[in-house]
Image (cartoon, rainbow, N blue to C red):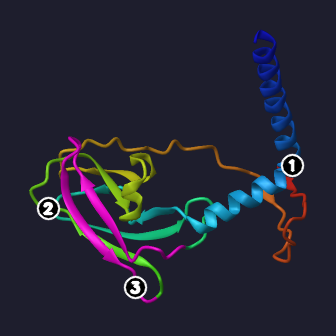
Amino acid sequence: MKKTISFLIVLAAAQLVYSQNTMSDTMSSDMIQNKMVKQLSLFPKEKVHLHIDRSVYMPGDTLWFKAYLVHSSFHIPLSLSRYVYVDLVNPFGELVKKIKIREDERMMFHGCIPIPGQIAAGDYTLRAYTKYMLFEEEQHLFRRDIRISLPGKEKFTELRSTSLPASKGNVIKLGSNLLIHSYYSVSFLL
């Protein structure tokens, strides 16, 4: 009885070792890469990126933006979703404003968020996403910090330029027919 159990254990261990060796031999890196590309093509993930007109606003301003919807791995335009949602969130995590933007005829998303006139100053967050992205983890949503400041309340320091001694050097102009990806030397006369 002990010999039979020992034999079965050795046979099971040999089978495990053999199956691991044959599996690693048959799975090449090209095969894994092809399977990964196929997986990403069949089940693409979206990624949203926003371009905004500036990063500091005042109450009553309008925040203009343009949204880009791309594939999360290949960074090529992707048009799975027809709508992009953009939220303005206050420093306490509360939703201030939410808008829904439809894709236009050129497959672009652009819009604006009117900032309320009675909003408190502080660091706010822009959050952009699609409905498909809500099924993913929170970290996949686009986030960008913006500042809303009251006029006259912020203190900015003026940068004063220090006068540098006048330069006596000249640069020899090489011309405008320079080739791209070539090395050139520049001469300075002091």
Q: Mark 3–mark 1 contact, CB under 8 Å?
A: no
- The numbered mark, 1 or 2, whose residue comes first in the sequence reads 1
Q: Does 74 sit above or below residue 160?
A: below
Front in this rendered view, residue 120 or 144: 144
Left or right of 1, for residue 51: left
Which mark lies nearer to you, 3 or 1?
A: 1
Q: CA distance from mark 3 to mark 1?
A: 47 Å
| Stretch in magenta | 78-105
Residue underneath mark 3: 104
Of helix, strand and loop, which one carries label 1?
Answer: helix
Kind of residue at disc 1: Thr
Q: Nearer the viewer, mark 3 or mark 2?
A: 3
Quadrant, the N terminus: top right
Task: Report x, y in % for residue 82.
Answer: 39, 77
| Front position among marks 1 and 2 | 1
Q: Which residue is mark 1?
A: 26
Q: Give the residue number, with chain letter if any, for mark 2.
A: 116
Side (left or right) of 177 relative to 77 = right
